[in-house]
Amino acid sequence: MTRVVRIGAVVAAAAVAVVPVAAQQQDGMVAVTQASRFQMQVFEMNLGAAIERGAQQLVQRARQVVPNVNLQLQARPVVNSILLPEGAVFYVQIPGIEDVGLKLWEMYLRQAPSRPLPAPPTNLPRVANSSGSVTTGGVVADDPLVMPLTDPSKEYTAFVRLALIDAMLDNSFALPVAEGQFLTLVADELANQPADPLAQRSHKLILRIKGDDLIALRQQRITRDQARQRLIESKY
């Protein structure tokens, strides 16, 4: 059975296609100019690159334990978007790690359980509030990076989560998100959800930040750390 990453978060219903340029305001959608569509597509590419960057960070970390381990993604990330009256919504589908690499990792740990595991990196950004609860204007932090690497899937989730947060703060300034609107990102696993609707499913991740905060960050009226604290994260 193929294993896929599970990544925490919230509910959000979003269509998975950018509204055509010629679309008029109808059924809750808005007209999208050619410039806006281009900006949305560029940000889609930035989010895909962020996921791949998180996977590469995992590989580097895993090779501290198993030098020749080869952890690869099952597929390329898929990112789609839609522009709504309340702002821009991006739906991110995150591929899991290839099952072969995970099995080799587990085999190594069984054969050499006494080998010390490397400490977590000390230069990674941290998000406040590690209690696991949602706070108004804050961020939920489920941070497995405080522990040595024992579960590649879990650490992959953490690296991707941080990379997506960085992308939202660093690459979203050109998006058509005005004051009073939100930039919303919904992340889910790419495939292999259980067929049984009652079976446990991977959690979704939703990250939201106000357009007001993005504008304030761009104009340097708030710092990047302050903008990060205003990012809202929830679990579903």
Image (cartoon, rainbow, N blue to C red):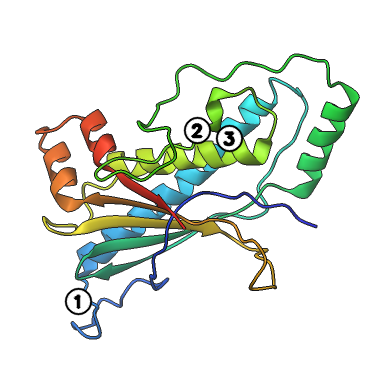
Rendered-image quadrant of the N terminus: bottom right
Neighbor class of circle 2 (other Cα within 10 Å; few <14, some 14-19, many 20+) is: many
Q: Residues within 10 Å of mark 3 (few under 14, many from 20)?
A: some
Q: Which mark is residue 56?
A: 3
- Residue at 28% x, 65% y: name it: 37
Q: Nearer the viewer, residue 60 or 195?
A: 195
- Tell me if 179 is positioned left or right of 68 in this view: left
Residue 53 image position (x, y, % from top left): 51, 38
Where disc 3 sits, the SS reads helix
Q: Quadrant of residue 83?
A: bottom left
Q: Is residue 128 visible?
A: yes
* CA–CA distance in space, label 2 to label 1: 39 Å
Q: Which residue is mark 2?
A: 143
Q: Give yes or no for contact between labels 3 and 1 (Cβ–Cβ under 8 Å).
A: no
Q: Position of residue 92 (x, y in %)?
A: 46, 58
| Residue type at the position of mark 3 | Gln
Quickly name the residue at label 1: 31
Residue nearest the observer in this picture, 236 or 123: 236
Q: Are marks 2 and 1 in contact (CB under 8 Å)?
A: no
Task: Please tell me in which quadrant of the rendered image residue 213 appears.
Answer: top left
Tell me the crowding category of disc 1: few under 14, some 14 to 19, or many 20 or more residues within 10 angstroms, Cα based: some
Q: Give the amino acid type for the residue marked by disc 2 in the picture.
A: Asp
Q: Earlier in the sequence, mark 3 or mark 2?
A: 3
Q: Secondary structure at mark 1?
A: loop
